[in-house]
Amino acid sequence: YFKDVSKLDRLDVYRLLALFEVSDPALQHIIKKALCAGKRGAKDFAKDVREIADTANRRVQMLVEDGL
């Protein structure tokens, strides 16, 4: 679970997703929301967590539809 980031001055969510090779858009969305849940000012923590759950449920639904 560790990535060498010693060469970087900063680490943002997009670099994090790239380092961990997260390519699924739904998972990217979940991770971005989880990292800043309730801290972006637009929505409170509970709303962000509900949206994370909604996105995860939709991704599961897509897996079922694809027969996976």
Image (spheres, helix red, strand yellow):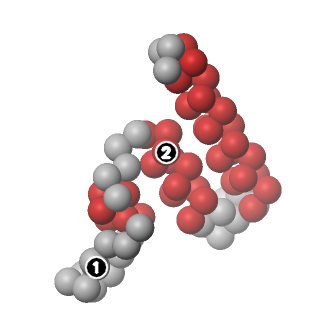
Determine which of the numbered discs, if any, sits on residue 50 in the image. none
Quadrant of the rendered structure where residue 24 is? Answer: top left
Q: Is residue 46 above or below residue 25?
A: below
What residue type is disc 1 on?
A: Val
Q: Nearer the viewer, residue 22 or 32?
A: 22
Residue at horizontal 37 percent and vertical 73 percent from the top: 2
Q: Helix or strand or loop: what does disc 2 sit on?
A: helix
Q: Is residue 4 left or right of residue 50?
A: left
Q: Is residue 12 left or right of residue 8?
A: right
Label 1–label 2 contact, CB within 8 A: no
Q: Position of residue 5 (x, y in %)?
A: 28, 79
Q: Quadrant of the N terminus?
A: bottom left
Q: Amino acid at mark 2?
A: Leu
Q: Is residue 14 visible?
A: no
Which numbered circle lies on residue 27? 2
Q: Residues within 10 Å of mark 2 (few under 14, many from 20)?
A: some
Residue 9 x %, y %: 27, 85
Camera-side residue: 66 or 27?
A: 66
Can you give x and y, in whole percent of width and height, for residue 35 in the image? 56, 65
Residue nearest the observer in this picture, 61 or 47: 61
Compared to 34, does 9 lie above or below? below
Residue 31 appears in the rendering: yes
Instruction: Tell me where residue 12 appears, x and y as whole percent.
Output: 38, 70
User: Residue drawn at (31%, 52%), measured in percent from left and top?
Assistant: 21
User: Label 1 belongs to which residue?
Assistant: 5
Q: Is residue 61 above or below residue 65?
A: below
Crowd around label 1: few <14 · some 14–19 · many ≥20 (10 Å): few
